[in-house]
Image (tube, rainbow, N blue to C red):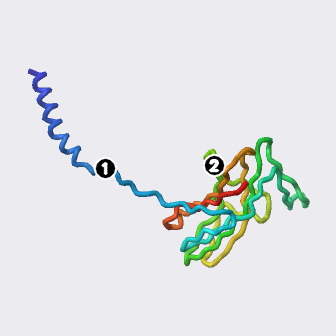
């Protein structure tokens, strides 16, 4: 008798639960298309209603020189074996009416193997800051340094545009090697 009551209870629960579960939100096969990517060549400018960005002057090298204020002399920074430096210049201009957050936090480099490289500390005075506010109408120019694998190919510089509330996800500059 207990078995029969248990089966009857389970059957009733399934009968009630099945229609309730099927009344949930319908899953559509249409997914929202991802925001487009703006593909550019080095020296070309990405422009949104709020910002103008240009990546230029790429240099791949095993070392760079900088002035040390502490030592009051020029010094050389070298990469470890198997690595190179990628140095680029970034120009930004705030075209909007509000302050814009800019800097290294929005920039990365990538290669054909989908390896992401984040900026590293550049020991030079003309470096781009990690993060800073760019006032309306203000322009900024700075250099950005990446440590990349020596054999890296298909290099691109990527700037994240999502925080600008535009329809473009990111701008990518392809580096000719």
Residue positioned 80% across, 61% down in the render: 124
List x then y, in percent, for residue 33.
43, 57
Question: In which quadrant of the rendered view does residue 12 lie?
Answer: top left
60 in relation to 15, above or below: below
Residue named by callout 1: 27
Q: Secondary structure at mark 1?
A: loop
List x then y, in percent, for residue 47.
58, 71
Q: Secondary structure at mark 2?
A: strand
144 in relation to 114, above or below: below
Image quadrant containing the N terminus? top left
Residue positioned 64% across, 60% down in the render: 173
Residue named by callout 2: 116
Q: Mark 1 or mark 2, which has the lower sequence index? A: 1
35 to the left or right of 116: left
Residue contact at pointers 1 and 2, CB within 8 angstroms: no
Residue positioned 22% across, 48% down in the render: 23
List x then y, in percent, for residue 165.
50, 67
| 85 and 20: which is toward the camera | 85
Disc 1 packing (10 Å; few <14; some 14–19; many ≥20): few
Disc 2 packing (10 Å; few <14; some 14–19; many ≥20): some
């Amino acid at each position: 008798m207990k078995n029969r009551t248990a089966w009857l209870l389970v059957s009733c629960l399934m009968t009630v639960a099945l229609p309730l579960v099927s009344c949930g939100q319908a899953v559509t096969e249409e997914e929202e298309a991802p925001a487009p990517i703006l593909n550019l060549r080095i020296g070309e400018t990405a422009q949104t209603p709020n910002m103008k960005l240009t990546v230029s002057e790429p240099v791949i090298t095993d070392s760079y020189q900088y002035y040390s204020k502490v030592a009051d002399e020029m010094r050389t920074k070298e990469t470890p074996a198997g690595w190179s430096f990628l140095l680029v210049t970034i120009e930004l201009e705030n075209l909007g009416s509000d302050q814009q957050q800019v800097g290294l936090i929005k920039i990365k480099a990538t290669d054909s193997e989908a390896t992401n490289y984040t900026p590293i500390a550049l020991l030079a005075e003309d470096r781009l800051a990690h993060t800073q506010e760019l006032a309306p109408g203000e322009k900024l120019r700075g250099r950005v340094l990446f440590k990349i694998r020596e054999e890296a190919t298909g290099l691109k510089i990527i700037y994240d545009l999502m925080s600008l509330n535009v329809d473009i996800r990111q701008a990518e500059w392809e580096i000719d090697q």
